[in-house]
Amino acid sequence: MIPPTIRSERLTLDALRPSDADAVYRYCQDAEVQRWVHIPSPYTRADAQYFVTTYASDAATSAALTLWAIRSEPGDLLGVIELRHEPLGSATVGYWLGHEHRGQSVMTEALATLVEYSFDAQGLDLDRLRWESFSGNLGSAIVARRNGFHFEGTLRRAVVHRDSRVDTWNASLLRGDDREIHDGWPL
């Protein structure tokens, strides 16, 4: 799906551009991004070019995926956030942020903006959002928790990452849920 432009107080969520390749390449050299995100390792410039052109173009023409760049108001790429659409008004959210932009509530704000758009009848009109991350990804879990997601548990050896099966943490948020922080997270 072509990503509509969504704005918050400090951020713009819009389409990736070919000119974002250098920033994507730089951010994906970070050990934390490599540890928690399904990306090639080592991550090459060709991988970054593929991501901002072919992958982004495929996402724009797919009904199954919507991919946004997260930008500061001057337009600099800070990270990405995506929805993998599922049947009956549901989607799974995933995200990553460049190292130098962490710790400033950028991703918390980006996810809050996407949550509101996702549940809005004038937006995606979804009923449910699901969050999943490798177990131990505290940064991602904190962002989901701050946005009111309810922790639902750990799936043992649920996905393959770097030739190993790893556990995942899972949480969800329904349209009618409050956006308060809920207990039960393994933080």
Image: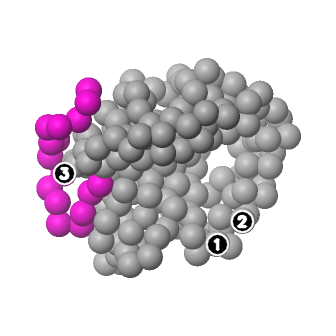
Q: Which residue is mark 3?
A: 179
Cα–Cα span, label 1 and label 3: 29 Å
Asked if labels 3 and 1 touch by Cβ distance under 8 angstroms, the answer is: no
Residue 181 x/y as whole percent? 16, 41
Count neighbours of disc 2 (C-alpha within 10 A) and say few if under 14, some if 14 to 19, many if 20 or more: some
Q: Which residue is mark 1?
A: 62
Residue 50 x/y as whole percent? 80, 49
Mark number, residue 58: 2
Q: Residue at x 73, y 50 (%)?
A: 52
Count neighbours of disc 1 (C-alpha within 10 A) and say few if under 14, some if 14 to 19, many if 20 or more: some
Asked if labels 3 and 2 touch by Cβ distance under 8 angstroms, the answer is: no
Examine the rendering and report whether any part of residue 66 can be seen: yes
Count neighbours of disc 3 (C-alpha within 10 A) and say few if under 14, some if 14 to 19, many if 20 or more: some
Mark 3: which amino acid? Arg
Cα–Cα span, label 2 and label 3: 32 Å
Mark 1: which amino acid? Ser
Magenta segment, which residues?
A: 172-187
Mark number, residue 89: none
Q: Nearer the viewer, residue 107 or 32?
A: 32
Asked if labels 1 and 2 touch by Cβ distance under 8 angstroms, the answer is: yes
The kind of secondary structure element at disc 1 is loop
Mark 2: which amino acid? Asp
Q: Earlier in the sequence, mark 1 or mark 3?
A: 1
Quarter of the image for the C terminus: give it.
top left
Q: Nearer the viewer, residue 73 or 102?
A: 102
Residue 22 x/y as whole percent? 76, 35
* Secondary structure, magenta segment, majority class: loop
Cα–Cα span, label 2 and label 1: 6 Å
Q: Is residue 170 left or right of residue 5?
A: left
